[in-house]
Image (cartoon, grey):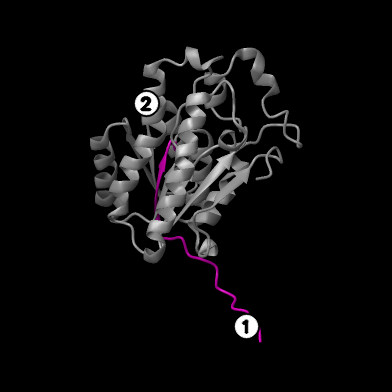
Amino acid sequence: MIILIIEPLENWSGKVAIVTGGDSGIGRAVSIGFVKEGASVVIVYYNEHKDAEETKNFIESLGGNCILISGDLKDSSFCDKVVEETLNTYGKIDILVNNAGVQFQQKSLLDVTDEQFDLTMKTNIYSMFYLTKRALKHMLPGSSIINVTSITTFKGEPELIDYVTSKGAIVGFTRSLSTNLADKNIRVNAVAPGVFWTPIQPSCWEAEKIPTLGSDAPMGRAGHPYEIAPIFIYLASNDSSYVTGQVIHINGGEYKG
């Protein structure tokens, strides 16, 4: 006999999410999506104050609640501050989205300086380790950690070697941490975006490449951040209660892993 259990719609009121890089791009779309569901959001960003204020104002126009915390996630003491301010303001952490990252285009490995490699790794993976370790102490069963990797981890990208290396490390971190936390009912998953129209694109690529970004996908275009936000909502909700250690690909059909 098959018994169907229909759960009531989840109430997100009272949920608290930390979203790094939440001031713009995918992080902004995810923050807004969480607020629309009823959560309060802590937006962590580096120094893009105008973008952050615009995001906060929009969230508040929806009747939502968020705070902004600016600083350098490569500094472990700043990660302590993020957790402390979140707990002081909201008293809990239910969702952690590790989205902040950098990428730099270089034609050859020989062009990647030691300083650039160090910056990329510390921004993209060290900061994730620091913040997750500190937030985890305060996350209860049912909580969700969502890390942002990249399609380039699975396809390779000849002009983003250090970036792809860091994003591959995120996949390993996600899969290992998910197994470590499974018995605590804290789920850890990753999202691997294809090309999306975010501020990181024009800041990274040569100007002549910008118009063609995303054209390799079967859908023939880059994605918009609002098109990926729903998968974060799913992974943060009880609807994904049996989903952990997974990498979800959102890329317009470009990669079918």
Residue 53 locus on image (x, y percent): 41, 32
Examine the rendering and report whether any part of residue 123 can be seen. Answer: yes
Residue lying furthest bottom: 1
Front in this rendered view, residue 158 or 220: 158
Task: Determine the secondary structure under disc 2.
Answer: loop
Under mark 2, the amino acid is: Asn
Q: Is residue 50 above or below residue 175?
A: above
Under mark 1, the amino acid is: Ile
Residue designated by label 1? 3
Which residue corresponds to the image point at 53% horizontal and 18% vertical from the top-left? 105
* Residue 78 lies in quadrant: top left
Tell which tag, 1 or 2, sits nearer the viewer.
1
* Residue 15 lies in quadrant: bottom left
Task: Determine the secondary structure under disc 1.
Answer: loop
Q: Earlier in the sequence, mark 1 or mark 2?
A: 1
On the rendered image, what quadrant is the C terminus found in? top right
Examine the rendering and report whether any part of residue 14 can be seen. Answer: no
Q: Which mark is residue 176?
A: none
Q: Which mark is residue 47?
A: 2
Residue 166 locus on image (x, y percent): 45, 33
Residue 199 locus on image (x, y percent): 53, 26
Task: Mark 2: give few (<14), some (14-19) or many (20+) Cα within 10 Å.
Answer: few
The part of the chain drawn in magenta is 1-22
On the rendered image, what quadrant is the N terminus found in? bottom right
